[in-house]
Image (tube, helix red, strand yellow):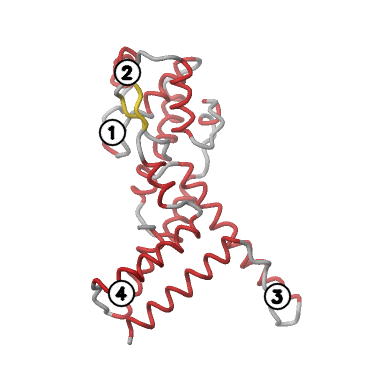
Amino acid sequence: MQLLTKKTIKRILKKTQHVVDVEDFDLIEELDGLAEKVAGVSLRERRLLNSPFDLCGIKFYPLTVAKSLWYAEKVDAWEIDGHEQEALLFWLLSLPLTAKSLEAHSGRETADKACKKLSRKLHCQPDELGEVYRKCIGTQSGDSDDLDGSPADYGGMIACLIKEYGGTDEKWLYETPVEMIGSMFYQMEKRVIAEEDASRDKSASGGKAVAPTPNKSLASLNDFNLKAQEIEEKWSA
């Protein structure tokens, strides 16, 4: 279920004091389908993004915000360069999407041992390594230089996503792929810009609002809100 759906259903239940039963499942499923379009990431795509990729019996996971920040910090602190950066990043992708997996390798000696252990297990062609790397990094260019030096302002981004879609810091930092976060944040930005444009048009036209040109995302958000209102009215009754 989408985070937007969970947040909305939770709000409606709190307001209406409704008790969910089997008859409500179809309504919730319909609402969740609309939430997928708002987020810009379908349920199928989300499952694929969260699924690890197997290579030589080893699982590799999509890049997350926490891993990106960890990588940038360690490259700088440990003064790692060249091929060692690539090896560190590739090993980092093999860690499960949990906070504990990063905490267990906070020291360089531990991380170095883990990298060497991984390299001994990987008996494959360079193109196989590159394919898994591209799948895990997603929309990144694949150049490790993109991930060091000046990481994005993830703090503000995560705060905005929590406000918009719900969830927790840990969920967004450790469990959600960077590619998915980028997609959802982009959709949120478009909505905010459209609302600001509508507000400016209202002021310019002497109090008569001029609606922004609707795009697929805004139309989906409108459909979602209408469905949520319908559910709230039904459960209130």
Which one is in front in this view, the residue at disc 2 or the one at disc 1?
2
* Front position among marks 1 and 3: 3
Q: Earlier in the sequence, mark 2 or mark 1?
A: 1
First in sequence: mark 3 vs mark 4: 4
Identify the residue shown where x is 51% and y is 54%: 40
Q: Amino acid at mark 1?
A: Ser
Q: Amino acid at mark 2?
A: Leu
**Residue 68 quadrant:** top left
What is the CA distance from the residue labelled 4 to the residue labelled 1?
Answer: 36 Å
Quick one: label 1 or label 3, which is nearer the N terminus? 1
**Dot 1 and dot 3 residues touching (CB under 8 Å):** no
Q: Are marks 3 and 4 in contact (CB under 8 Å)?
A: no
Which residue is depicted at the point 58% across and 64% down? Answer: 218
Viewport quadrant of the N terminus: bottom left
Residue, x 25% and y 73% (percent of image)?
20
Label 1 Cα neighbours within 10 Å, binned few <14 / some 14-19 / many ≥20:
some
Within 10 Å of disc 2 (Cα), the crowding (few <14, some 14-19, many 20+) is: some
- Left-right relation of 38 to 208: left
Mark 4 lies on residue: 13
Q: Please state which amino acid type lies under the numbered disc 4.
A: Leu
For disc 1, the marked residue is 101
Disc 1 secondary structure class = helix
Which residue is drawn at the image coordinates 43% and 14% (left, top)? 125
* Residue annotated with mark 3: 210
Which quadrant of the structure image shows residue 228? Answer: bottom left
The disc placed on residue 118 is: 2
